[in-house]
Amino acid sequence: EKITEESSIADVMAWYTSVNAVMLDILTNQIKETDNSGVW
């Protein structure tokens, strides 16, 4: 079964989006945690 270029691009985009969401979540939590110490 050959993966078409279009579907693999869609897979990459879906993966990238989910990773982005997780990273944004982690960064947001870190900013909230360090907000009190006045680093940001």
Image (tube, rainbow, N blue to C red):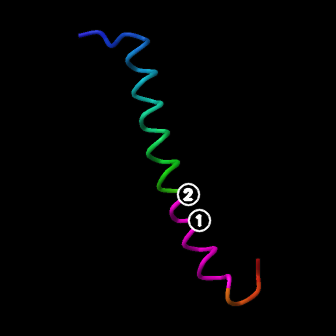
Mark 1 neighbour density, 10 Å: few (under 14) some (14–19) many (20 or more): few
Q: Is residue 30 magenta?
A: yes
Q: Could you tell me what secondary structure mostly forms the magenta stretch?
A: helix
Q: Which disc, if any, is residue 1?
A: none
Amino acid at circle 1: Leu
Question: Relative to residue 7, is residue 25 drawn left or right?
Answer: right
Q: Nearer the viewer, residue 4 or 37?
A: 37
Residue range in magenta is 24-35
Q: Residue at 43% across / 38% down in the picture?
A: 15
Q: Which residue is mark 1?
A: 27
Quarter of the image where the C terminus is located: bottom right
Does 35 appear above or below 17?
A: below
Q: Position of residue 22 (x, y in %)?
A: 47, 56
Q: Is residue 28 magenta?
A: yes
Q: Which residue is mark 2?
A: 24
Quarter of the image where the N terminus is located: top left
Q: Position of residue 18 (x, y in %)?
A: 44, 45
Evaluate if marks 2 and 1 touch, with contact meaning CB atoms under 8 Å apart. Answer: yes
Mark 2 to mark 1 CA distance (whole Å): 5 Å
In the orientation shown, which residue stands out farthest toward the right? Answer: 39
Amino acid at circle 2: Leu
Q: Residue at 76% across / 86% down in the picture?
A: 38
In the orientation shown, which residue stands out farthest toward the left? Answer: 1
Q: Residue at 43% across / 11% down in the picture?
A: 5
Q: Position of residue 16 (x, y in %)?
A: 49, 39
